[in-house]
Image: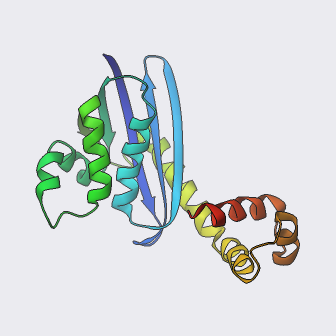
Amino acid sequence: MDKITIYTDGSCHGNPGPGGWAAVILHGSTRKEISGGMYYTTNNRMELTAVIEALKTLSSPSDVTVISDSKYVCDHLANVKRLMCNPTAKNKDLWSQIMRATIIHKVKTRWVRGHNGDVFNARCDALANAEADMIAHEKDIRQAVFSALLADHTLSAEELAARCRVHITFAEKYRAQFFSGR
């Protein structure tokens, strides 16, 4: 079994609000960074999403150490099966994805104090915050494109860019999201 170390972090501007997640995946001398975000979410959901997305990158069963500054993740990951039996547990949809991953991978956690000089924890924090910042910054653009598409769903990306006075890349991005249902 490969030994993998995964650093994760989640960020949310407002709780709920625009959020970001990030992971740094270490396998020997190989380092991979992944990140993403959501428009309306919570910090805990972003913390869990970081773990899920990192585990999805693994191509074979692995011995994984997840390092996080989230007590929520570290405290509950070891007892995910018991958590799933709790009818009042929050974020069960995400915990169930993690539970499925623990069938494939041997997963343990290690808590690290946030903002305490750990290079990879700091990198995850920066990536997650950048994702949340980007989503918050693009909120008005996204709303303008979605509103225009609600009024006329036949608009092309070029027409949207002109109508909403946004760069074509934003029009393409949010037009695609509008039609994908994300």
Depth order, front residue of 68/52: 52
Mark yes or no: residue 118 visible. no
**Residue in the image at 29% along x and 44% along y:** 98
**Residue in the image at 87% along x and 65% along y:** 158
Q: In this view, does 87 lie to the left or right of 162?
A: left
Q: In this view, does 130 lie to the left or right of 105?
A: right
Q: Is residue 8 above or below residue 61?
A: below
Q: Where is residue 42 in the image (x, y as percent from the top left)?
A: 39, 66
Q: Which residue is farthest bottom?
A: 151
Quadrant position of the C terminus in the picture: bottom right
Q: In this view, does 90 lie to the left or right of 8?
A: left
Mark yes or no: residue 36 visible. yes
Q: Is residue 160 left or right of residue 150?
A: right
Q: Quadrant of residue 140?
A: bottom right
Q: Which residue is farthest front?
A: 154
Q: Position of residue 76 (x, y in %)?
A: 19, 49
Depth order, front residue of 45/84: 84
Q: In this view, does 135 lie above or below 116?
A: below
Q: Position of residue 155 (x, y in %)?
A: 81, 72
**Residue in the image at 46% along x and 36% along y:** 24
The mark tally for this picture is: 0
Q: How does the figure colour the protein chain or chains? A: rainbow
Quadrant position of the N terminus in the picture: top left
**Residue in the image at 24% along x and 64% along y:** 90
